[in-house]
Image (cartoon, helix red, strand yellow):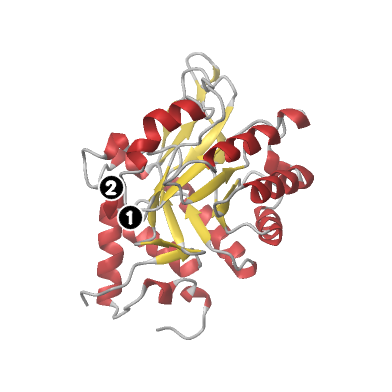
Amino acid sequence: MSDVDLSVYIKEIKFPNPVLPASGTFGFGEEFSDIYDLNILGGIVTKSLRLNYHPGNPQPRLYEVPCGLLNSIGIPSEGYEYFKDHYLPFLNKLSIPKVISIAGNTIGEYIELIKYLNKDTGIDIVELNVSCPNLEEQGRTFDSDKDALTKVVKEVLASSKYPVIVKLSPNVDSILANAKLVERLGADGVVIANTLLGMAIDINKRRPVFKNIFAGLSGPCVKAQILRLVWEVAEEVKIPIIASGGISTFEDAVEFLLAGATLLQVGTANFFNLYAMPEIIDGIREYLDKNNVSDIKQIVGLARKEKML
């Protein structure tokens, strides 16, 4: 079946296939552009952009654990002006959809950044990272407080000329409740999920590895947990779900599609297999061909249905 249709949509934005990099694992794409043609991807998701320069957390920032990775990066950013001058021209050369992840420590920072991005060309979707510390609310993350999450999502949706997807953290009382909330507010999609909290201790120094003690856990070790979250959210949320967490093979990708994800973000796998995303795209196509499925949309959520194709 040579004409398998891998395309999926968020609103009117067409993704030629569902495989994208996860924010923070692919830079702005330039680092991978000499390895393969980025236009074979479904789209590109940038590292989180801040309004102003931010150095991120001190070293160490990464620590390998069995089947995964702990990171305490701290969302470093050169700021909008640097992005506009150095990264946006490169992104504009790509033919695939561009998803710009944004971060901030106040609602005002998000809104001012959105207003700048609204003037740019070549951007298709904004991914709202709400796992940032809210400095106006004693440093609690935006998505750990219903009122703060409501306010930032409302303000961004009202200000953005682009469709907005919201990247949610699993480190809250209920990611399902937050997904339902952002859907009611009018978000165009929801990313399930940001990294899980973990930690490591240096047994020689007898101290936590990271200055902030806790760090984000990602990689194959989190796949089963994130798959469960995607399943639960897909049961009650109708906007597109972008699955992110533990996807490293085409089999992983197909599981998430069957559970109800429309799009897939590949993160940690890019570090240990530079060709992870092209291989996953090819694997999905071969799987559909082998199973006589002509359109990838036919298998989204299929595992929850009684009658199989």
Residue 161 on image: x %, y %: 57, 51
In the image, what residue occupies the spot 58% across and 45% down? 128
Identity, as a three-letter code, of the amino acid under mark 1:
Thr
Tell which of 274 and 207 is nearer to you.
Answer: 274
The C terminus lies in quadrant: bottom left
Dot 2 lies on which element?
Answer: helix
Q: Residue furthest bottom?
A: 307
Residue 275 on image: x %, y %: 25, 46
Please indicate, yes or no, whether residue 27 appears anywhere in the rendered image: no
Q: CA distance from mark 2 to mark 1?
A: 18 Å
Residue 92 horizontal side relative to residue 49, left or right? left
Reading the chain from its start, which is encountered first: label 2 or label 1? 2
Residue 1: image quadrant is: bottom left
Asked if residue 266 is positioned above or below residue 257 in the image, the reply reads: above
Please indicate, yes or no, whether residue 66 appears anywhere in the rendered image: yes
Q: Which residue is mark 2?
A: 38
Asked if residue 104 is positioned above or below residue 293 in the image, the reply reads: above
Marks 2 & 1, CB-CB < 8 Å contact:
no
- Circle 1 crowding by C-alpha within 10 Å: few under 14, some 14–19, many from 20: some
Tell me the tag on residue 249. Answer: 1
Asked if residue 288 is positioned above or below residue 157 in the image, the reply reads: below
Residue 135 on image: x %, y %: 72, 28
In the image, what residue occupies the spot 35% across and 75% down? 295
- Circle 2 crowding by C-alpha within 10 Å: few under 14, some 14–19, many from 20: some
